[in-house]
Amino acid sequence: MIFANPIYLYLLLLLIPLIGWYIWKSRKTQASLQVSSSQAFDAPAARSYKVYLRHVPFILRVAALAFLIIVLARPQSTDNWQNTSTEGIDILLTIDVSTSMLAEDLKPNRLEAAKDVAASFISGRPNDNIGLVIFAGESFTQCPLTTDHTVLLNLFKDIQCGIIDDGTAIGLGLANAVSRIKDSQAKSKVIILLTDGSNNMGEIAPVTAAEIAKTFGIRVYTVGVGTEGEAPYPFPTAFGIQYQNVRVDIDEPTLKQIASTTGGQYFRATDNSSLKEIYSEIDKMEKTKIQVQEFSKKQEEYKNWALIVLALLMLEVLLRRTILRNIP
């Protein structure tokens, strides 16, 4: 807990002379009675409970003043925030979510395999700015560059085929990724483009998008996902899911050209293990310092303390007006 106005806490020192004054006053106000003999008072007299409670109103008032001073100091709950400098690179994952990614030559299917491997990759690179772009017949940014990988991994869970128009707009997906990462100040800017098909939609040619990436010093690693030949694909029918083998059609020449144009590398992932090979290559790249500013939201906590002040004052008044009432 922190205080917005901690200087008010020095007022708590004023309670010390207040307590001293009360003790001094209590000693001066003891009543006395002169009698010729004290024999009648030799037997111990039972004390009323009011004798033990007579100081309670003052204690309640002092406690109320102490809590009131805390209210004036404005207690707040917050986490620490600071600017830190870490080593990392900027990476934008660009993933194909067309319906062909449902083919099950990778387990459980291409898309889920790509998500699982990418999630493991993200978890292993805590210092990197990582973002996510998805594409099919069109493209949009699922998550901008961030070091908050918890948020990024949560967004990964929402990726599924069919959330955007079907098709394979590789050039559009790459161009969208370039626009998201081009203004980065990192020395190493990387796009990992994963697809299982050939460009058949979009107004931007993949090679053109690659030239734009090269202009901004962005390295593109391309990954073709799919086995050789044919792959089992689930088709919904009136009798349930039926599997048929469909031809695997990956435009490897274009993916290789994209990678070579930008200084990256092309990979062919025919199974889950080969999909992980791209990450060992990325680990070898140069890292650069990035500034990370961690924020936390402050929340005022004075309300609870104010309620305590009110409760103490009400209890003091109640005691003074009832069982501890002084009769002149």
Image: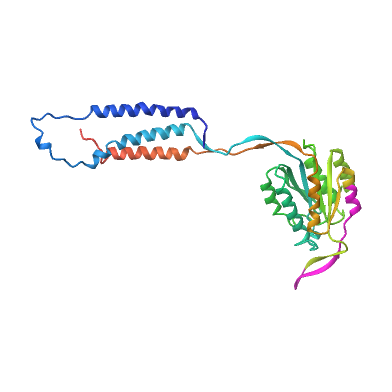
Identity of the residue drawn at 81% across and 66% down: 232
Residue 205 visible in the displayed image = no
Residue 7: image location, x then y, percent: 48, 27
Front one among 108 and 209: 108
Seen from this angle, which residue lies furthest bottom? Answer: 239
Place residue 125 in its image quadrant.
top right
Place residue 289 in its image quadrant.
top right
Vertical placement of residue 176 versus 246, above or below = above
Question: Is residue 248 one of those drawn in magenta?
Answer: yes
Question: Is residue 223 one of those drawn in magenta?
Answer: no
Which portion, as a residue range, is magenta? Answer: 236-258
Identity of the residue drawn at 85% across and 56% down: 197
Identity of the residue drawn at 35% across and 26% down: 17
Colouring mode (rainbow / by chain / secondary structure / one colour):
rainbow
Left or right relative to 63: residue 125? right
Residue 113: image location, x then y, percent: 76, 57
Left or right relative to 118: residue 293? left
Tell me the quadrant of the picture where the C terminus can be found.
top left
Residue 124 visible in the displayed image = yes
Left or right relative to 19: residue 111? right
Front one among 182 and 45: 45
Give the total number of marks visible in the rendering. 0
Residue 227: image location, x then y, percent: 84, 61
Residue 281: image location, x then y, percent: 81, 47
Front one among 284 and 255: 284
